[in-house]
Image (cartoon, rainbow, N blue to C red):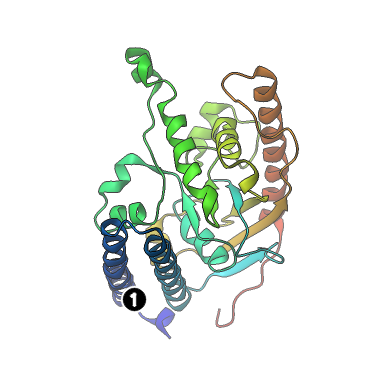
Amino acid sequence: MFTSLPGFIRIPLAMLLLTINIVLHVLPLFAFTLVKLVLPIRAIRLACSRVLIVIAESWIAVNSTLFDVFTRIRWQVDGLDGLRRDGNYLVLCNHQSWVDIPVLQKIFNRRIPFLRFFLKSQLIWVPLLGPAWWALDFPFMKRYSRETLLRHPELQGKDREATRLACEKFRHMPVSVMNFAEGTRFTPAKHDAQSSPYRYLLRPKAGGVAFVLDAMGDALHAILDVTIVYPEGPCTMMDLIAGRVHDIRVHVRELPIEAGLTGNYDEDAAFRGRIKFWVNTLWSEKDAQAARLHTTANPAPKGD
């Protein structure tokens, strides 16, 4: 019904309902976060943490429903069978667009433990959302440019230590840690500047993957290799809200954590070479999977 509304009505209405959904979920989220901070009793804090996850999963579920109601997206998703809500996963995904995040949240919500992303430290200042991400234990990372590190060598390794501390927190709860190994969204300009050997992907960075695997250790039980493709081309969050995204294809593959994938990335040159080779091999396989997704026919949804 809503997909047939004129754009000048449908888009503001969708944005209004998404905003209302944020407010309705963020307010109780903050209330339970306050209780968690004020009462230093372990049992109460654990109970509050569980309630916070329930609120966050409800928030995601309503967002996903709104996208279903206001858009006509042809979904092609495979590889979700056998996933566990009580498992601990490292989720590795290519990064095409900010739309990747609601896509991942939709397909994994209540199938695996609540997804947590590494976020840039500046995002904590986003109204409502920044404090909400903080309340839900999203790790905020402060990245330093090469120029900054040359001027302030004492900052070397600070971002990696923050990764380690963030992951230590997750050793005692079911968690899915999300990592965009490319470190940035794909654009043709970035692809050319990197001389990327892949057709659809940027070069991956093995360091972040290695640090999560090392920090989480045996707390992780599997890796989820996720490939996202938008056959119509690059898209934005506004494209999604406006209903201009019509085709989304996702492939999920569960991989074991092989022996030899944990070690000291900074100090062990042999391990560094091994994890780089593993990540690059994974990305070659992912690029081939992206090519297959681009060429796969996807039937139109009902009503198209």
Q: Amino acid at mark 1?
A: Arg
Q: Quadrant of the N terminus?
A: bottom left
The quadrant in which residue 35 appears is bottom left
Residue 88, horizontal then vertical, whole percent: 60, 54
Residue furthest out toward the bottom: 1
Q: Quadrant of the C terminus?
A: bottom right
Number of disc labels: 1
- Residue 47 at least partly seen: yes
Residue 277, horizontal then vertical, whole percent: 71, 29
Instruction: Look at 71% across and 49% down and name the residue there.
Output: 289
Look at the numbered disc 1 and give the secondary structure of its residue.
Answer: helix
Q: Is residue 281 left or right of residue 108?
A: right
Image vertical order of residue 112 relative to residue 97, above or below: below
Image vertical order of residue 141 relative to residue 277, above or below: below
- Residue 246 at least partly seen: no
296 or 212: nearer the eye? 212
Instruction: Look at 62% across and 74% down and name the residue there.
Output: 300
Instruction: Look at 47% across and 61% down and name the residue there.
Output: 102
| Residue placed under numbered mark 1 in the picture | 10
260 or 126: nearer the eye? 260
Residue 17, horizontal then vertical, whole percent: 31, 74
Instruction: Look at 44% across and 52% down and name the residue there.
Output: 98
199 or 148: nearer the eye? 148
Image vertical order of residue 6 relative to residue 232, above or below: below
Residue 245, horizontal then vertical, whole percent: 49, 63
Q: How many residues crowd around disc 1 within 10 Å: few (fewer than 14), some, or many (20 or more)?
A: some
